[in-house]
Amino acid sequence: ITIGSAGKSFAVTGHKIGFAYGPKHLIKPLKLLHEYSTSRCSTPLQEAIAIAYEHEYEHLNQPSSFLKQFATSLQAKRDLIANMLSEVQMNAVIPEGGYYVTVDIRKIAKRVNFTSEEGETKDTKFVNWLSKTQV
């Protein structure tokens, strides 16, 4: 079964729309599960996403492909943020896909005091400290 998220593919994560493709005997139970776990999905949005995927299929690996440009753009941004974090001794876990970069703050946490910040966890306290100090 192939499952995809249009929200992630086209950077419209607020729109919860996706697809599943596979053998009928496996897709049928998924359709049943979907019917009982969601309330509705906008028909115009479904049409728009279908058109977007059709366009991408026709233009894949061409300069006019949003997905190709988007992947290249995300990789450049990922590399930039990873280098910036490395310069301040914060190591990034380099993702192979997705929007998020996870950061190891253990080294910098030894050098700054953020224990008095609000939050239940170290990462929350650290982010609150960063936002106040504007480092």
Image (spheres, rainbow, N blue to C red):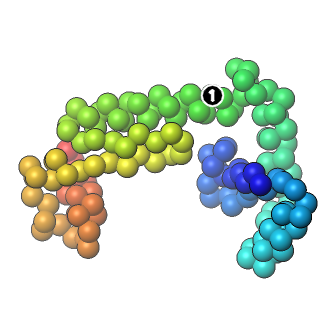
Which quarter of the rendered picture does the N terminus lie within? bottom right
**In the foreground, 68 or 92:** 92
Image location of residue 8, percent across then percent down:
63, 49
Q: Is residue 8 left or right of residue 22?
A: left
Q: Nearer the viewer, residue 70 or 94?
A: 94
For the C terminus, give its image quadrant.
top left
Q: Is residue 83 left or right of residue 99?
A: left
Q: Does residue 128 appear in this view?
A: no
Element type where label 1 sits in the image: helix
Task: Please give the count of numbered marks on the rendered protein.
Answer: 1
Q: Note whether residue 7 is visible.
A: yes
Residue 27: where, in percent of width, then height?
84, 63
The residue that label 1 is drawn on is 69
**Does residue 117 sit above or below 77 in this rendering?**
below
Instruction: Identify the residue at horizontal 21%, vertical 47% (top origin).
Output: 134
* Residue that lies at the very extreme toward the bottom in this rendered image: 36
In the picture provided, is 71 more to the left or to the right than 78?
Answer: right
Q: Position of residue 70 (x, y in %)?
A: 60, 33
- Name the residue at 22% across, 32% down: 87
Report x, y in % for residue 133. Answer: 17, 51
Position of 85 relative to 35 (above/below): above
Residue 131, quarter of picture: bottom left
The amino acid on which the numbered mark 1 sits, given as a three-letter code, is: Gln
Image position of 57 with respect to 130: above or below: above
Most extreme residue toward the right is 24
Report the residue at 67% width, 44% height from top. 10
Which residue corresponds to the image point at 83% horizontal and 71% vertical from the top-left?
29
User: Label 1 neighbourhood size at 10 Å, few (<14), some (14-19), many (20+)?
Assistant: some
